Image (cartoon, rainbow, N blue to C red):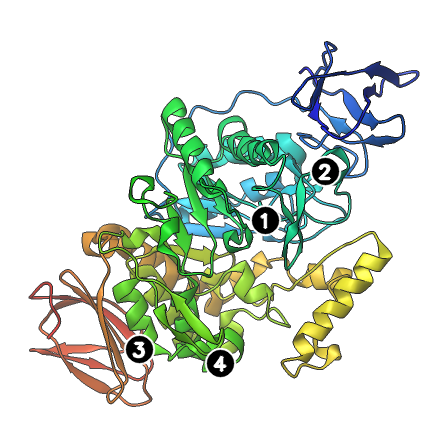
Amino acid sequence: MRPRVWAPNVSQVELVTFRDPQPAVTPMQRRDDGWWETADALSPGDRYSFRLDGNDVLPDPRSRWQPDGVHGPSGVPDLPPARPWRGRPIVGSVIYELHIGTFTQAGTFDAAVERLDYLVDLGVDTVEILPVAAFPGHHGWGYDGVFPFAVYEPYGGPAGMRRFVDACHAKGLAVVLDVVYNHLGPDGNVLGRFGPYFTDTYRTPWGPALNVDAAESDDVRRYVIDNALWWLEDVGVDGLRLDAVHAIVDLSATHILEELAVNVSRAAQRSGRPLQLIAESDRNDPRLLTPRGDGGYGLDAQWSDDFHHALHVTLTGETSGYYGDFRGPADVAAALTHGYVYTGQYSPYRRRRHGRPLPPDTSAHQLLGYAQTHDQVGNRARGERLCHLVSVERARIAAALVLTAPFTPMLFMGEEWAAGTPWQYFTDHQDPNLARAVREGRRAEFAAFGWSPDDVPDPQDPETFHRSILNWSELADTSHREMLEWYRTLIALRRAEPALRDPHFADASWDGATQILRIQRGDIVVAVNLGDKPMRIALPVRDVLLSSGDVDATGADLHLPPLAVAIARTTQRGEMP
């Protein structure tokens, strides 16, 4: 490896290599474009830093390895070639979202590898892992990473991640990595010391925004694109989940997301395997998914919070915050039929019109559907899972609606067995001022919703982290095993029935009088009784494929008990009566 660094606004850069008995200092030569280089070569295992203007000795902004943490020197990792893998499409698969630090007691990539057979048996196709970019402290969610190319060392560093990715591929599992391109964390963030990586024009809710459209932004954009290609081509992941893209402001003629999509498409052609980009956005903006030739950004998929929010309101009755925008089952039906619920109508929560319709030819698989995610669980004051808020019957309905929906389904780790552990917001900031600010900010945020400070777990308390680790011994309990079997059966049914894998949106309706939500997908109907009374539905059933209650199908009628779902094959296809 020949070290090089972009530092356009400094007058001197020196390479500092840490070798016995004394560190070696080598002057670097400046190019006209602000990059500094040296003919010296670094070998795997070497530690190095850059000294700026004879003063600051800092890690490499493009460091692939921070073996001593974010404040130590950078290292050159020794990564073997990736395992041969032809890849598999992520869009349309069954995705399982997990956090490496709390998925197992050990909280490492190697420990997660030991659970891959479980995921295969569950029926999962794709594993999506929360951010692993190097961040300070002993644990955290990962969204305050400061070295986007480096893998958090306590998880196992870059070598551990390579073993994890290779093990997933050996099991036939694709891997999606959550990456953050809207901001970086504050502690250990040295990028601004090297150059104009950040802008004062915009600011995200989590800190300064990356400079992707102002003066000297070309190399910042290249930094983002090279980071994506590092994960996809060098580390070997199959897709990236782009965090909060609505917080990336870019007024360039070519948005950074479009440029990223172009480069990832080229990488897919080079590698001969599918490489896909999934966005998180709350704007209901179809440009994310619209092909580039039609004026869009050309991303492959996006998370669908509209479906989640409508489903959550349906099952819990909660209407605080953004949940106040949703009408429950009627909006579940709207999401299943149209993708977005808000397509330009007035949003009371936002106090303005919101969204825009998806183009008619949009594949429903381009939206991810879920009942739980790290955000929707962890951003609650106490980190309650859905199974902590609703009955077993309602939790089963949630699973059935997610796994029979036309979307790409995603599960959050432990959801499938109704895990008893919460998933709370935990941090381990080493800076006491930052730790205090996070603690007080968290309490103030929930005080606005009527929560007492004593009800909000301290993110800095190690017990907040430990409470959030999955307890795999729960699988010995009958009730947890029964929920797990429900999920396994639903996933197997989705895999077996072409109608449930069809990428077209569903034909769904809600009858408030009968409390019946009805979803037609080809010759399969999903019927849900959300009321407290048994209901008879006129439905020509050929056979009941799966049900969560004592369902009776006689003649042209389907009898559903309260709070039950039935998945049935009918004698007719297409339009609903």
What is the x, y in percent for residue 240? 48, 42
Picture mark count = 4
Residue under numbered circle 3: 330
Residue under numbered circle 4: 318
User: Disc 1 residue type?
Assistant: Asn
- Number of the front mark, 2 or 3: 2
User: Disc 3 residue type?
Assistant: Ala
What is the x, y in percent for residue 78? 65, 21
Residue under numbered circle 1: 182
Identify the residue at image location x=43%, y=65%. 371
Residue 530 horizontal side relative to residue 459, left or right: left
Identify the residue at image location x=27%, y=50%. 495
Q: Earlier in the sequence, mark 2 or mark 4?
A: 2
Q: Earlier in the sequence, mark 1 or mark 3?
A: 1
Residue under numbered circle 2: 191
- Quarter location, residue 526: bottom left
- Crowd rating for badge 3 (residues with CA inside 10 Å; few <14, some 14–19, many 20+): some
- Number of the front mark, 1 or 3: 1
Examine the rendering and report whether any part of residue 457 can be seen. Answer: no
Mark 1 and mark 3: span between their CA atoms? 34 Å
Badge 1 marks a residue whose secondary structure is loop
Badge 4 marks a residue whose secondary structure is loop
Examine the rendering and report whether any part of residue 58 can be seen. Answer: yes
